[in-house]
Image (tube, coloured by chain):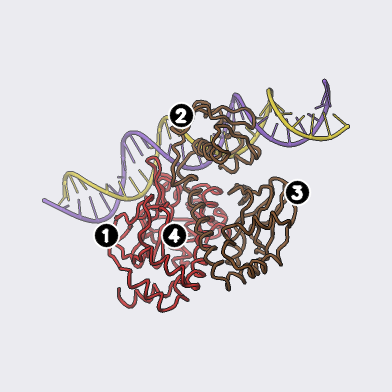
Chain colours: A brown, B red, C purple, D yellow
Amino acid sequence: MRQAEADLVRALPLFENVSEKHFDELMSTAFLQRFPQGVTLIREGDLPDFLHIVVEGSVELFATHDAHETALDILEPVTTFILAAVIRDEVYLKSARTLTPAQILMIPAAAVRAVFDRDAAFARALVNELAMRYRCVVRSLKNEKLRNSTERLANWILQEDAHQGGKGQIALTIDKRTLASRLGMTPENLSRNLAQLAKHGVVTSGPQFIISDVAALREFAKPNSLIDQ
Amino acid sequence: MRQAEADLVRALPLFENVSEKHFDELMSTAFLQRFPQGVTLIREGDLPDFLHIVVEGSVELFATHDAHETALDILEPVTTFILAAVIRDEVYLKSARTLTPAQILMIPAAAVRAVFDRDAAFARALVNELAMRYRCVVRSLKNEKLRNSTERLANWILQEDAHQGGKGQIALTIDKRTLASRLGMTPENLSRNLAQLAKHGVVTSGPQFIISDVAALREFAKPNSLIDQ
DNA sequence: GCCTAATATTGATGTTAATCAAGCGAGGCC
DNA sequence: GGCCTCGCTTGATTAACATCAATATTAGGC
């Protein structure tokens, strides 16, 4: 791992106050691995061997049941994932695959648990991280249960615009079928929903979404700080 | 608080290894309060003043948006709730109301954060608790996204039966409209879904559900250890 | 630049679930 | 007992969403 990447990982809130010694202990057993696009990194039901951190590229978390699949999240650098499974040493509830070529830092799960048992600062950072993650899933659940698919899309567009700098112009970084799954709808309905949103201030041309009328879009989307963000 | 209740709280995994001193510190500022049925205990959007623990009775966690409401969880003794909001000192994402007359132990949020900063055992217990909770919400999200309403009901019946001792006979402890909300459907559809399940080994008479054919029900429900439990 | 394959859109249809409306039934009250 | 209320059920209708099928569009490979 180059120094730049090491610094990024060190700067994660999760490691911020961990002692140098313990951080080195974690890193000495870790390794950085490069994966091509479309590789399954972990499979739900397996026991965790490593804590994963996306250092480069993007990763989709998804779950399957009875021949159905649903995307649960899409991760960008620098993010840890499957932390809860590692801490509890219980099977993954989600699978993960690379959406692009990616670099993943893998820290042996046993090392994470060992440092967690000895380093109070790490334990405290974990509490904060998990509390934050918990709240994110609660938001997802509310988004899913309280909004229809067009509203979810409208709010995603607002959030993604903010994330891309609020220029009122979004360039898709994932393909539409992945976005559809992420938003809990079929690709067909994503198309139809985008067509619907033309009435509410969104112009689309291929992978470019332009918000032509923010007020109208917000009026329709009804963004809610207790669901979004 | 009587000794019996104090012991129940002390026995929570969350407080298991907390020093006597710190536990007393938490309890000295806490108070036990009795609420009638139907009282709103917390409101989403408010900042947390207390960590709540259901000591007696049952509590519904729910969320609202745009004139819609959905139940997110139903809690029985002895359970903490809104822990993540307290830790992060951020607004509640859920509201809570009593479904029955209830006793709630309320620990000032500031005290929880203070002990969390000083007691490593408490921090570690919090990590475990939050990781567990996180996994529960992920299961809920998968349940919601990967199953239709009849399947959710079928699996709820299987789980509730196990919870009530696996006698193949369930007595509803909440009314059906609450159960419907909990399962993400309308009361009307709960009725219809129960009628559907007659074909799959469930006989109902009022608030009594009898599993007449477990094999048939399991065949239909397709329980999944990565979603249920 | 053209062909091909993958991706996206559009249309038709079926399924699932919400809504609106009416009816049933058990328990409480006079 | 009769009536009322409330919770539940049943039916009819509509809305949301998935699925299947066909067509259009785009991006790569040569």
Would you say the residues marked 3 and 4 are in contact, meaning their CB atoms lie under 8 Å apart? no
Q: Chain of mark 4?
A: B
Residue A216 bears which disc, if any?
2
Residue B137 x, y percent position in the rendering: 50, 56
Q: Classify 10 Å Cα crowding around label 2: few (below 14), some (14-19), many (20 and above).
A: some
Q: Chain of mark 2?
A: A
Would you say the residues marked 4 and 2 are in contact, meaning their CB atoms lie under 8 Å apart? no
In front: label 3 or label 1 = 3
Question: In what element is the residue under mark 1?
Answer: loop
Left or right of B55 in this view: B135: right
Q: Chain of mark 1?
A: B
Q: CA distance from mark 4 to mark 2?
A: 52 Å
Q: Classify 10 Å Cα crowding around label 1: few (below 14), some (14-19), many (20 and above).
A: some
What's the amino acid at mark 1?
Pro
What's the amino acid at mark 2?
Ala
Establish whether labels 4 and 1 are both on one chain. Answer: yes
Residue B36 bears which disc, if any?
1
User: What residue does disc 3 label?
Assistant: A36
In front: label 4 or label 2 = 2
In front: label 3 or label 4 = 3
Earlier in the chain: of badge 3 and badge 2, it is 3
Question: In what element is the residue under mark 3?
Answer: loop
What's the amino acid at mark 4?
Ile
Would you say the residues marked 4 and 1 are in contact, meaning their CB atoms lie under 8 Å apart? no
Left or right of B110 in this view: B162: right
Residue at image x 34%, y 74%? B5
Residue B87 x, y percent position in the rendering: 45, 61
